[in-house]
Image: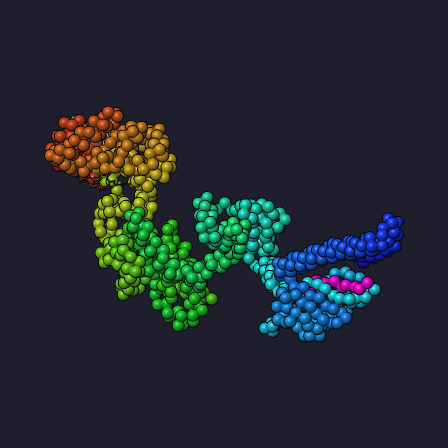
Amino acid sequence: MTASFSAWRLTLAYLLAASLWVLFSDSQLIALGLSLEQLERAQLLKGLAFVGVTGVLLFVILRTHHRQHQRSREALQHSEKRLQQALDAAQDGLWDWDLQSHQLYFSPGYAALLGSPSEIDQPQWLEHLHPHDREAFERTLQQRLEASNPVPYEINYRLRQADNSYRWIQFRGRLLFNPSGHAERLIGTACDITQRRRDEDSLRQAAAVFDATQEGVLVTDAEQRIVHCNPAFTRITGYEQAEILGQSPSLLKSGRHDKGFYDNLWHTLQQRGSWSGEVWNRRKNGEIYPQWQCIRVIHDEQGEISHYVAVFSDISALKRSQRELDYLAHHDPLSNLPNRLLFTERVEHALERDRSDQHTGAVLLIDLDHFKHINESLGHNIGDLLLKAVGERLGEQLGKRMTLARLGGDEFGLLYEQCQSAEQAAVMAQRLQSCLATGFEVADHELFVTASIGICLYPEDAQDVAQVLRNADSALFKAKSGGRESYAFYSQELTAHAHQRVELASALRHALDSQELRVYYQPLLCLHSQQLIGVEALVRWEHPQRGLVGPGEFIPIAEETGLISAIDAWVLQQSCRQMVAWQAAGINLQFVAVNISSRLFSRGELDLRVAEVLSDSGLPAACLELEVTESAVMDDPDTALRLLERLRNLGVRLAIDDFGTGYSSLARLKRLPVHKLKLDQSFVAGLPDDQDDIAITRAVIALGHSMGLKILAEGIERVEQLELLRQLGCDHGQGYHFGRPQPAAALTEQLENAQPPVYHGSNSVIRPGAY
Ligand code: C2E
Ligand code: MG
Ligand code: MG
């Protein structure tokens, strides 16, 4: 409009100027009064000037117009190029639909996408549309065309490609109207969003997985601040996402792992980009639980760490069922006892442990005798119930560090760790056998079973688990073939020895009641005056079959079986009574010495027992001497000290027996309230020749005297020993040289007939004297 207006103005100006020139130039020339010839020449010049001026004007106008045209064309090209570049950069295609001609124009990018020429008509284009999208497309298009405004719209469809595959295209367009208000064309861009839709689909799927998975997922940023978690995380830990956002995952720590564990985790994570393993964490309610956790490092495009993702599952249930499975794998379902597998493992461990601790142990195989008769006659159900009951009863007999197992069928195994002797194993075997002696009430039947037991001691009889079980098995075979309800050791000698010891132990139980124990008395003398000062009470067992049995044989058994307390108490009582009897008979003995076992000594209430016996018997406390061994005192010196003090307060005399065989601490010895040291007979035996024994004897005497104690030498058998001891300054003596232990009556008789008063030797007569 503006261009044509200025063209009109320019033309009118020209016409006006040209007309004025034509109208007034000639009259001006005439007014100059020129000759005709001059006038003609002037008119020619005027005409030429007019042509020249208008020519120049035309040239200027044309050149200006051309330049303008050139500039607009360049601007258009430039803008087209920019548009194309923009479309290329956006990977968009341009389309233009002429609604009059129904021609569709596609930019080369779009055409390439469709595999079509850049201009096709609409029906042709529609064929590219996915059949499912066609109806929706036409409906939307219709609505657009009917709309009277140029509001942009957006719509997504699938378009078929040249290779017949479909791609998702996003159309964005706008309806253009001509000046008269009729829709003229639809124009817009098209963009391939197939990949974006795929990505969105994957994201949607990932989000669904993230929400639905049973595994807890925790995402932190590079600074380890929690940025995201899933519902499973909340379910497992009890923390809602809102509570923990921005916090550190360390709030889940249970405290079960040390710094080294986390250092290692981070090291692996940095090195390998991922870590997986078992972690104990803490739930919001404080409960600690195990989880299996995988942590991964996420990097951004620059390769920098952007996030950490931890995926974990709560494995507490798994652990529980693993434990249950483990229990099932290692236990016999019928008896609930460990099975052969666990038993073998335990024996193996015990062998290793005891080997390094230098302990000994035993394995006992217990097999029920004639059990198959029960199964055959009463059925397997009853047999099973009986086996269960047997297992329970055997289990009641167990002490510390023992494992009972059912090895299969009617065979049980007992691992007896730290079993110190064959006797202990035999006592255990007997205890197991006798616990079965009472009948079993099973489903209205009273059933009786006996068991045979094979015993293998380790490490004497076997070093490895297979050997232990094999030898125990052959011992069991021996026991079975030697008549049922017996036990046997793998080694023949042990079997005989243990049998004897066990028999002795059970007989000893009756010995006290059956009054088979005797107290013998051995004289104790003053070595300087050679006078009798007291006697030592020594117990004997008058065994009905074996005759007189010495204490060396049965005291250890009595100590093992606990009978020692009763024996010592009995000896104490007998000795006190005998001493009172001697005093009443006018026999002047200073004291009776009674041995006290370390077992009884360590019990602590010995002083009460002694006080009771003294008051029952009426013996003055000063006439009783108690002998305790060095080891009994030194095992627990503080308790011993308190007990000895209580005993001394009673007024009884105290002696340390077998001095020199234990490991006394001189510092402790000094504090003990004892009166006497009894030098062990093993040192006296070497006198008078053995220089070491002489040195020890001399030292003990010097030591004792320096602490104000009397020294008694035990086991004096020869006169030379007596002489030397006397020279060394030893105070008292005891030994066969003076007299053997003998019954009270024999000693009484000897003392009553004592003539002359001084004691001269074992064959001489002794006389009680002043102390
Ligand atoms: P002991 O208390 O050191 O008793 C001395 C032992 O040496 C006694 O042995 C005695 O017979 C023996 N003996 C004495 N003189 C000689 C000798 O010249 N030569 C030799 N070779 N031996 C001699 P016995 O009676 O066999 O007693 C052994 C040990 O048994 C005692 O040693 C004592 O520790 C313990 N014992 C004895 N009676 C009892 C008791 O009633 N209770 C406790 N707990 N232990 C007792
Ligand atoms: Mg003694
Ligand atoms: Mg002794």
Residue at left offset 56%, top offset 54%? 217
Q: Position of residue 235 (x, y in %)?
A: 59, 54
- Say how many tags the image has: 0
Colour mapping: rainbow
Question: Is residue 178 rendered magenta in the image?
Answer: yes
Image height check: is 729 above or below 28? above
Label the magenta part by its dominant secondary structure.
strand
Split into 4 quadrants, where in the image is the C terminus? top left
Which image quarter: residue 109? bottom right
Q: Nearer the viewer, residue 696 or 328?
A: 328
Residue at left offset 32%, top offset 58%? 364
Is residue 389 toward the left or the right of residue 287 in the image? left
Residue at left offset 48%, top offset 53%? 274
Is residue 755 toward the left or the right of residue 208 in the image? left
Q: Nearer the viewer, residue 513 or 133?
A: 133
Is residue 168 toward the left or the right of residue 596 in the image? right
Write down the region rendered in magenta: 169-179
Question: Is residue 370 rendered magenta in the image?
Answer: no
Image height check: is 49 above or below 108? above
Q: Is residue 471 visible?
A: yes
Residue at left offset 56%, top offset 48%? 221
Q: Position of residue 24 (x, y in %)?
A: 87, 52
